[in-house]
Amino acid sequence: MNAVERTLRGLDRFQQRHTGPAVVVGVVKKFGDDRGGHLAALITYYGFVSLIPLLLLLSTALGFVLQDHPGVQDAVVDSALADFPVIGDQLRQNIHSVGGSGLALAVALLGLLYGALGIAQILQFAMAQVWNVPEVRRPGYLPRLLRGLLLFSVLGTGLLLATGAAALVGTTLGGEAARAGALLLSAALNIGLCLACFRILTPKDVPTKALLPGCWLAGPLFALLQTFGALLVTHQLRHASQIYGFFATVIGLLSWLLLAAAITVYAAETNVVLKRGLWPRSLLQPPLTHPDQEVLESLARQEERRPEQRVDVVFTDEDAPAEPGDTGSEGRKVP
């Protein structure tokens, strides 16, 4: 064993003996095991594609509900667009209510809704992957569709609450107090909104209290991203615009969406790790810890696609590969 390996083994033993570092390592490793980066990229893509249909639906719905209150309608739309750095002004200039009447309007709205449902579908897929739900137990198209509609309803309600809260803070406070109050209120609203969304997206057998840790993590991070995301994206665009020109704005928005998607996936992974006690994890294998084996078992059983299909998992010694059905001298077979 060389000096580098001895150092890494020492770090591994340290994190396994201390709960705080062990939980952090467990979350990061679970993120990697579930291909969390790939899930975040999918959420980013579908979020980007669904963005315009969602905003058009929002503007059209507000046009019907608040047709006698155009000021309130503009305030809600502005509140939604304020979350998107750099490109928010361009969106504001191009987002409008869908016009028409009768069948033409209904068809247009259904088309927009279908285009927006992509993000709801991929979020449900991501949560199923994170919780390692076997394919055979995942809901069909109609339940997923209903969940997506419920998710949009919750997000719309959250947007209305955020608009009202921002107006309240702006009228009661001023200066730095208003900024601090807005940040704290945004974090609190985000925590509640995350909890509602996670409850919709997460399997029903997971208790609601198990979803709270990820919400406490994601809520403040989303508030910081909404507050300082524009500064981050503007900094990136300062260098990218010289090379990419107009497309730098799109790249900036995608970067912002990717950060939001990564926060979402990490928050969900935190819930899974804490609920199932998936720590300590080993940084250097062998040997595998029991949580290591539990994660690998879940990943294997996740591939069950038919009710008559059953996946069994066997662990053996590294130096003594087992024959099919053999558990090895020190192996463990999971029935």
Image (spheres, rainbow, N blue to C red):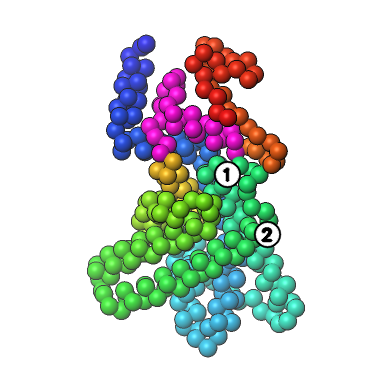
User: As shown in the figure, which amino acid type bears the numbered disc 1?
Assistant: Val
Query: Label 1 crowding class (10 Å Cα cut-off): few <14, some 14-19, many 20+?
Result: many
Residue ID at (65%, 66%)? 113
Per the image, is 231 magenta?
no
Q: Which residue is mark 2?
A: 142
Query: Upstream in the sequence, badge 2 or badge 1?
Result: 1
Q: Which residue is mark 1?
A: 133
Residue ID at (35%, 34%)? 22
Residue ID at (41%, 70%)? 162
Could you say where residue 84 lies in the image, as x and y percent from the top left?
A: 47, 61
Looking at the image, can residue 244 be seen? no
CA distance separating discs 2 and 1: 18 Å
Q: Nearer the viewer, residue 198 or 113?
A: 198
Task: Report helix, strand or loop for mark 1.
Answer: loop
The image quadrant of residue 275 is top left
Q: Is residue 86 above or below residue 26?
A: below
User: As shown in the figure, which amino acid type bears the numbered disc 2?
Assistant: Leu
Residue ID at (53%, 88%)? 68
Work out which residue is located at the far right of the displayed protein and give it.
103
Q: Nearer the viewer, residue 58 or 302?
A: 302
Work out which residue is located at the far bottom of the displayed protein and give it.
68
Q: Which residues are magenta?
A: 277-302
Q: Quadrant of the C terminus?
A: top right
Could you say where residue 34 lies in the image, as x and y percent from the top left?
A: 53, 38
Could you say where residue 116 lies in the image, as x and y percent from the top left?
A: 62, 62
Locate residue 157 relative to residue 191 in the image: left or right. right
